[in-house]
Image (spheres, rainbow, N blue to C red):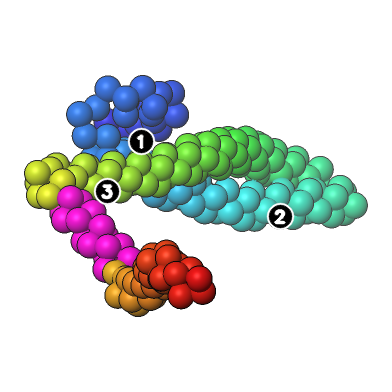
Amino acid sequence: MGIFTRFREIISSNINAMLDSAEDPEKLIKLIIREMEDTLVEIKASCAGAMAGVKKVRRQSDEVRSREKYWEDRAKLAVSKGRDDLAREALMEKRRYSQKADALEKEMREHSDLVDQYQNDIRQLEDKLAGVREKQRILIQRHIHATKKKQAQEEIRRVDTSQAIFRVDALENRIEQMEAEAELVNFGKKARLEEKFDRLTVDDEIEKELQSLKSPLVQKEEK
């Protein structure tokens, strides 16, 4: 496959559609990037060759134009010396170099147009490559996220539900025991205090009953 054929296929391809239908998008995008990078290297090498060609043809054109000017000056000199025969020969040489110079300038324009096309292709391919690399970065992030999410789900499934419930029940029982222990901290003191007040109440009742028993006797003695 030629360099231009590959370039046209890459530029016209729908990368997103290719990735959506691929079984392994990450592997596919790596292959696409490698193909684009290889094509870019070839286009740049071809562009460099065309640029070198422009310089070479320009140098040749300058040399030919210099020879053209030389024979023009020779023809003028021959005319000034009355040598029309030499002037005609000089003008023939001038025409030959002039035609050659015109051909070289045409070739130079063709090389320049080719360089422009190569540079335009390079810009398009570099833009396309930048977009694919960004797509690769997003795919890698999505893959990492999906992997972590899968690991988390597997970890949750590995947890024994019955053991988890047992641990919760045990923790609840422990908390209830701690609450009960807290309530019992002052239980003994509270009981002794209430007992003293209860004793005072009992003493009052006994005193009343005693006074009731003594009351008739006191009345008899007074009589």
How dense is the environment of label 1, judged by Cα within 10 Å: few (below 14), some, or many (20 and up)? few
Residue 111 seen by the camera: no
Label number found at residue 30: none
Q: Is residue 216 left or right of residue 104?
A: left
> Which is the main secondary structure of the residues drawn in magenta?
helix
Label number found at residue 66: 2
In the rendered image, residue 31 lying in the magenta stretch gets the answer no
Indicate which disc, 3 or 2, sits on the residue closer to the N terminus. Answer: 2
Residue at image position (35%, 31%) is 6
Helix, strand or loop under label 1 = helix
In the rendered image, residue 182 lying in the magenta stretch gets the answer yes
Q: Is residue 92 left or right of residue 177?
A: right
Q: Is residue 94 left or right of residue 159?
A: right
What amino acid is at disc 2? Ser
Helix, strand or loop under label 2 = helix
Where 75 falls versus 195 (above or below)? above
* Residue at the front extreme of this rendering: 223
In the image shown, does 39 or 160 lie closer to the viewer? 160
Indicate which disc, 3 or 1, sits on the residue closer to the N terminus. Answer: 1
Where 183 falls versus 143 (above or below)? below
Q: CA distance from mark 2 to mark 1?
A: 38 Å
Q: Are marks 3 and 1 in contact (CB under 8 Å)?
A: no
Judging by the rendered image, the residue that carries numbered circle 1 is 3
Place of residue 105 in the rendered image (x, y in percent of width and height, measured from the top left): 65, 40
Q: CA distance from mark 3 to mark 1?
A: 41 Å
Query: Quarter of the image holding residue 66?
Result: bottom right
Residue 101 seen by the camera: yes
Residue at image position (90%, 52%) is 80
Place of residue 89 in the rendered image (x, y in percent of width and height, measured from the top left): 70, 43
Q: Are marks 2 and 1 in contact (CB under 8 Å)?
A: no
Which region shows up in magenta? 167-183
Judging by the rendered image, the residue that carries numbered circle 3 is 148
